[in-house]
């Protein structure tokens, strides 16, 4: 032991001696942007006249050891003026770099490369890592919300794990309208596996000219995501994390027990029936179902550790993260967990060869409850069940009776069975019992990774090859116990267990050659490349009854005791083979030109149209660089852009060009029914891509030393050759072939404006963007008579429709013209022949419009009663920094969109109602738009009409954040580079006229948009977090 101590002491003594012999002075500092005060990561700091230097970390800080002879440091970064600062014995040297006025230097990702924003000819919007980190987000898509003009991001619901709806310049198809996502060069199937903290930048290719490099898949836009890489010459270890609580932001005011009983009695009287309640007897219960259902202070947390670093010839970054979110409805029954690990690296082998990798692993677990459905949704049940039913039934007399005494009712944690309503119809059940009876879970393991090599045999020539994979394996588990919810909803005979395994595997191999050359003031770059991708999917599943009631979360098929088991499975695959090229040219960064051509071949199409060609052209002119503009002082940048291009959409079902067999059809022969096989639909060998043809005209400008910058884009995007499957008479015995006959147009304007400034130690910025988009279905089948029925609500059938000349999926119903005030008004409401249009109506009923004036109120009078697509979407963001204190906010919103308010089941007699119903029509309250309440609705007041349509416009304070970064004097003592603390809140305030819980309702499909059947609302969240870097 003594010898070991002696060795330690010797090593310590040698270390101390060496530190004295090689003692050097250490200087530190922070490098910032002179205009907005934002820190600049990656800036070079070097001792003048030497090679001794370093680069700033992710927070713009640096530490550099210098000799006593050092006189000055030189600080530089691309796009900024080089700054030389004397040392003069100082240990802290901060720098504020001025933006270079000779070029617009921001670099954007353009697909298979990068380009200076000044010479970009297309419409590209960018979001940086700093912007992503300034607003805690649950999913990566949310980073685009309110920050990028032309990109509409709408949360589908507040359920953990749900993907938002993303539309770039409107919905350009009646099929899959989502953009494609390219992560580190690979086109991936969804981005829910990504940890937002791993992202360096997001670039959105909005116009056809910039997106054409992705050809057949780019019709709906392209989102390029670049993950973080290490910085040469430094090592950083960063921990970041937060913990928060979530609560319901709004509850809908519903009738209490007294009001409910009073209203039901009135409904019975108006229908000529006996009153069901004795109002003199006090109700036994008065349940606030929303209060009981919403989880209080549902937790949300995220933790991440990131290590990055590098040397002169290599760099790397690695991270691990853990994210968990419980829902405000159902708690653990509605939960999303994500665990990620990432390793990115790059190594310079020789002066002409680099190689690297991007590797990410994600484990996801999702538990969800039914949402936004008219049947079986927890929230819709909470809004419709009567307040007289208790959460749990504890009355001994009632418990001794059926069904509590005879049926397998569900029990709550307090030991009592959940209450069963004796008032509402069988479609409405106790929402807490419904949640408790959910026993499903999805587990997915996903691996996305790639390797690449870059060769530079001569100056200006780069050859790159990259191979990537996207592998996901998911297990869906579900257990159905024996249960009884009411007389119509239950499983009384046997339990069952279901398991299904699904596997996705995509590989992609890209090969590119890029040659760039500068000849005087002329800059050329040529890119040619090939890409091959194959996508496969397979599934296998089984189910079996009579599973033991042991542990709902750990039940397996082999435990089930039934002798009969069910099994199923299948597989699909498709492939894409592509060739592409791009030529860019600019003269003095003043005149720019871009041309792209891509050829794609897809296995989704037959031999007649297997290949498609997708060209684009773009030009730009930086007018402010002209000599005659130099005298215009406040104008620093004035740039005009114009582009045209064609993109494709191959996101269609497979084998539409062929006639696959349907093995479930049958026919009646004599007294028997025989199952056989027949073609599912007729073949169409000429089926081909949907094509998006787009023109974009734009102005970019910068004023006041580029403190004020902005962009205005005007676009017209027409998608042709939309797939359409026309209706055909049933006796044909076969479905009609799919055809490329439809067209849809989106045209609009995008505007963004940003201002940044600094005054002493105060720096601030504010940004705003707005987009106007008009969507029109210009052609379905060319006859002008075709229509595409859309989504349904309750038992009312389709409530959306699509015809030529109207937007996709407009709300479809009857127009109303007020309330009948008297019988005289009823009989004065007549058709062209003098006959009463609504002979069954009485005072207090709705007056419907005979739109086609044929003397009958029927389906032919249904028309456009609302548009779920906003006219305008907008965002407003700002930030402020002062002496380590930072503050930021983000507003998002929409204007001109409607919502179908279908969360109340008005077609059912006994359901509860919002308190707005207290303002219904009565003889004493005739001045209202709400009709009378009656059990016998002979006038069908509740048919789908404009009474269900509400203004869905809103302005929401999406995020507000206050942070504090410790000063260097404290950081130096603890050995940290930076340490920040913050508090934030999400969905703080929402200004809207919509009466529902949440006006932000995304699209389930192209034809199911903004229909509120009881959508799971977004939570109001409060968080505390920290980030520390060593």
Image (cartoon, rainbow, N blue to C red):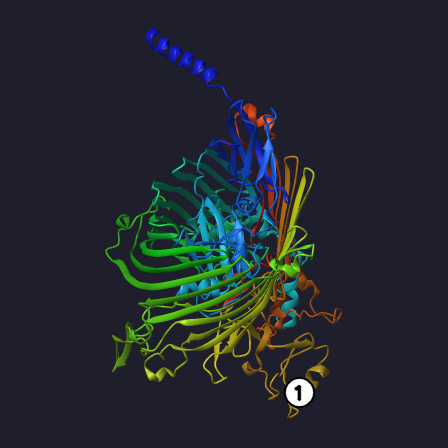
Q: Is residue 894 left or right of residue 689?
A: right
Residue at the front extreme, as displayed: 520
Residue at the right extreme, as displayed: 924
Residue 303 percent location from the top left of the image = 48, 38
Quick check: 945 above or below 1?
A: below
Front residue (pair 745, 538): 745
| Total count of labels | 1
Residue at the top extreme, as displayed: 2
At x 45% / y 39%, what residue is drawn?
231
Front residue (pair 169, 761): 761
Residue 9 percent location from the top left of the image = 40, 10
At x 64% / y 81%, what residue is drawn?
849
* Residue 485 in view, yes or no: no
Front residue (pair 396, 75): 75
How packed is label 1: few (under 14 Cα within 10 Å), some, or many (20 or more)? some
Residue 241 percent location from the top left of the image = 51, 38
Q: Which residue is mark 1?
A: 830
Image quarter of residue 702:
bottom right
Q: Secondary structure at mark 1?
A: loop
Front residue (pair 392, 242): 242
Quick check: 342 above or below 729?
A: above
Quick check: 362 above or below 681?
A: above
Residue at the left extreme, as displayed: 563
* Residue 382 in view, yes or no: yes
Q: Image quadrant for the N terminus?
A: top left
Quick check: 257 above or below 310?
A: below
Residue 811 percent location from the top left of the image = 56, 72
Image quarter of residue 610:
bottom left
């Amino acid at each position: 032991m003594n010898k070991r101590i002696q060795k330690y002491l010797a090593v310590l003594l040698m270390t101390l001696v060496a530190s004295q012999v090689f003692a050097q002075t250490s200087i530190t500092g922070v490098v910032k942007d002179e205009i907005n005060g934002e820190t600049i990561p990656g800036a070079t700091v070097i001792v003048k006249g030497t090679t001794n230097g370093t680069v700033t970390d992710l927070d713009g800080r640096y530490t550099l050891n210098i000799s006593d002879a050092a006189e000055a440091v030189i600080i530089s970064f691309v796009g900024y003026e080089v700054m030389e600062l004397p040392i003069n014995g100082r240990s802290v040297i901060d720098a504020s770099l001025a933006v270079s006025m000779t070029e617009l230097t921001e670099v954007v990702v353009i697909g298979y490369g990068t380009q200076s924003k000044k010479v970009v000819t297309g419409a590209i919007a960018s979001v940086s890592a700093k912007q992503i980190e300034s607003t805690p987000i649950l999913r990566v898509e949310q980073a685009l919300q309110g920050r990028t003009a032309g990109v509409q991001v709408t949360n589908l619901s507040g359920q953990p794990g749900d993907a938002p709806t993303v539309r770039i310049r409107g919905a350009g198809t009646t099929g899959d309208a989502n953009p494609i996502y390219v992560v580190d060069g690979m086109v991936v199937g969804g981005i829910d596996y990504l940890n937002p903290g791993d992202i360096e930048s997001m670039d959105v290719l909005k116009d056809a000219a910039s997106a054409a490099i992705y050809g057949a898949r780019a019709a709906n836009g392209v989102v390029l995501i670049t993950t973080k890489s290490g910085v040469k010459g430094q090592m950083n270890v960063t921990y970041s994390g937060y913990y928060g609580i979530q609560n319901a932001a709004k509850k809908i005011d519903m009738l209490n027990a007294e009001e409910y009983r009073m209203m039901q009695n009135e409904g019975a009287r108006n229908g000529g029936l006996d009153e069901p309640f004795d109002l003199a007897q006090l109700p036994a219960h008065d349940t606030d179902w929303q209060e009981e259902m919403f989880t209080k202070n549902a937790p949300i947390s995220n933790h991440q550790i990131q290590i990055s670093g590098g040397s002169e010839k290599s760099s790397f970054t690695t991270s691990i993260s853990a994210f968990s979110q419980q829902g405000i409805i159902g708690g653990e029954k509605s939960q999303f967990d994500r665990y990620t690990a990432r390793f990115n690296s790059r190594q310079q082998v020789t002066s002409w060869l680099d190689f690297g990798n991007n590797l990410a692993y994600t484990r996801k677990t999702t538990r969800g409850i039914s949402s936004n459905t008219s049947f079986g949704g927890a929230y819709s049940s909470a809004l419709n069940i009567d307040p007289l039913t208790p959460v749990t039934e504890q009355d001994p007399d009632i418990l001794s009776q059926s069904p509590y005494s005879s049926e397998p009712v569900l029990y709550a944690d307090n030991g009592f069975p959940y209450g069963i309503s004796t008032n509402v119809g069988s479609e409405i059940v106790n929402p807490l019992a419904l949640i408790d009876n959910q026993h499903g879970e999805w587990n997915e393991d996903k691996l996305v990774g790639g390797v690449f090599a870059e060769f530079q045999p001569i100056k200006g020539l780069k050859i790159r090859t990259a191979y990537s994979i996207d592998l996901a394996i998911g297990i869906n588990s579900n257990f159905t116990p024996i249960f009884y919810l009411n007389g119509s909803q239950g499983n009384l005979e046997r339990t069952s267990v279901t398991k299904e395994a699904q596997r996705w595997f995509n590989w992609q191999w890209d090969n590119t050659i890029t040659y760039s050359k500068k000849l005087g003031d002329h800059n050329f770059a040529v890119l040619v490349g090939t890409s091959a991708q194959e996508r496969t999917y397979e599934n296998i599943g089984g189910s079996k009854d009579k599973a033991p009631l042991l542990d709902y979360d750990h039940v397996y098929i082999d435990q089930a005791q039934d002798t009969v088991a069910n099994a199923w499975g299948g597989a699909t695959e498709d492939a894409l083979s592509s060739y592409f090229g791009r030529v860019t040219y600019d003269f003095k960064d003043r005149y720019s030109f871009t041309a792209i051509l891509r050829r794609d071949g897809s296995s989704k199409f037959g031999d007649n149209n297997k290949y498609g060609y997708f060209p684009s052209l773009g030009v730009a002119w930086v007018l402010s660089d002209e000599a005659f503009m130099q005298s215009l002082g406040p104008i620093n940048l004035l740039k005009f852009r114009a582009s045209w291009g064609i993109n494709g959409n191959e996101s269609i079902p497979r084998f539409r060009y062929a006639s696959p067999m349907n093995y479930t059809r049958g026919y009646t022969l004599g007294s028997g029914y025989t199952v056989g096989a027949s073609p599912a639909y007729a073949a169409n060998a000429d089926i081909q891509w949907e094509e998006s043809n787009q023109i974009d005209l734009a102005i970019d400008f910068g004023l006041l030393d580029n403190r004020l910058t902005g962009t205005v884009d005007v676009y017209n995007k027409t998608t042709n050759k939309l797939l359409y499957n026309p209706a055909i008479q049933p006796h044909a015995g076969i479905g009609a072939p799919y055809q490329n006959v439809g067209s849809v147009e989106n045209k609009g304007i995008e505007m963004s404006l940003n201002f940044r400034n600094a005054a002493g130690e105060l720096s601030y910025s504010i940004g705003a963007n707005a987009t106007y988009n008009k969507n029109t279905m210009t052609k379905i089948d060319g006859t002008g008579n075709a229509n595409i029925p859309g989504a349904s609500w309750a038992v009312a059938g389709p409530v959306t429709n699509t015809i030529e000349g109207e937007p996709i999926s407009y709300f479809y119903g009857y127009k109303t013209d007020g309330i009948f005030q008297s019988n005289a008004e009823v009989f004065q409401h007549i058709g062209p022949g003098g006959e009463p249009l609504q002979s069954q109506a009485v005072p207090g009923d709705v007056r419907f419009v005979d739109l086609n004036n044929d003397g009958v109120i029927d389906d032919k009078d249904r028309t456009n009663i609302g548009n779920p697509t906003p006219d305008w979407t907008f965002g407003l963001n700002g930030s402020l920094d002062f002496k380590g204190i930072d503050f930021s906010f983000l507003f998002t919103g929409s204007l001109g969109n409607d919502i179908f308010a279908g969360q109340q089941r008005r077609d059912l007699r006994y359901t509860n109602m919002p308190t707005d119903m207290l303002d219904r029509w009565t003889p004493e309250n005739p001045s209202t738009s709400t009709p009378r309440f009656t059990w016998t609705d002979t006038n069908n007041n509740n048919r789908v009409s404009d009474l269900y349509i509400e203004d869905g416009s809103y302005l929401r304070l999406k995020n507000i954040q206050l942070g504090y970064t410790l000063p260097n004097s404290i950081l130096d003592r603890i050995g940290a580079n930076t340490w920040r603390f913050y508090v934030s809140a999400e969905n703080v305030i929402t200004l809207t006229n919509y009466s529902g819980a949440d006006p932000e309702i995304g699209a389930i499909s192209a034809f199911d948009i903004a229909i509120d059947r009881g959508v799971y609302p977004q939570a109001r969240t409060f968080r505390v977090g920290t980030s520390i870097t060593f």
